[in-house]
């Protein structure tokens, strides 16, 4: 598995030709007729839907949301104390 990652890394270094990662990614996406703007728009829409879902859930059940927040704080607190 490690050899596979090395091979991919070397192939990426050889194929870069001095371009940065964004240029290479964009040209690869264009080569396969992938519209990255559509992916961006879809991701933004999904994040907005998730935010709205969370807000609706918190408004519907505030005590449950508070309980989850307390539980997460306790877990993170114990984890940070180690």
Image (cartoon, rainbow, N blue to C red):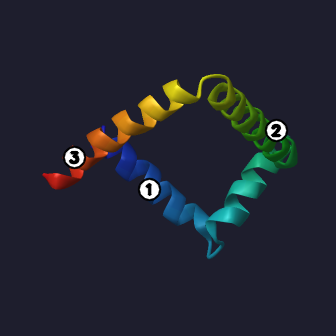
Q: Judge from the rendering whether residue 55 lies leftward or rightward of residue 15; answer left or right.
A: right
Q: CA distance from mark 2 to mark 3?
A: 34 Å
Q: Judge from the rendering whether residue 50 lies leftward or rightward of residue 79; answer left or right.
A: right
Task: Return the x and y of residue 20 as percentages of the image width and height.
Answer: 64, 71
Element marked by disc 1: helix
Q: Residue at x 44, y 56 (%)?
A: 9
| Mark 3 or mark 1, earlier in chain | 1
Task: Return the x and y of residue 61 as percentages of the image width and height.
Answer: 60, 23
User: Closer to the camera, 68 or 8?
Assistant: 68
User: Closer to the camera, 17 or 20?
Assistant: 20
Q: Which residue is mark 3?
A: 79
Q: Which residue is mark 2?
A: 45
Disc sitting over residue 9 in the figure? 1
- Give the mark count: 3
Mark 3 surroundings: few (<14), some (14-19) or many (≥20) residues within 10 A: few
Q: Is residue 26 above or below residue 56?
A: below
Q: CA distance from mark 1 to mark 2?
A: 33 Å
**Disc 2 and disc 3 in contact, CB within 8 angstroms:** no
Q: Residue at x 79, y 46 (%)?
A: 40
Q: Residue at x 68, y 60 (%)?
A: 24
Disc sitting over residue 57 in the figure? none
Q: Residue at x 44, y 31 (%)?
A: 68
């Amino acid at each position: 598995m490690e050899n596979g990652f090395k091979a991919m890394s070397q192939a990426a270094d050889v194929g870069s030709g001095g371009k940065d990662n964004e240029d290479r990614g964009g040209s690869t996406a264009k080569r396969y007729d992938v519209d990255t703007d559509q992916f961006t728009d879809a991701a933004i829409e999904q994040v907005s839907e998730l935010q709205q879902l969370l807000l609706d859930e918190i408004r519907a059940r505030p005590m449950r949301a508070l309980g989850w927040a307390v539980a997460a704080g306790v877990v993170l607190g114990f984890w940070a104390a180690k």
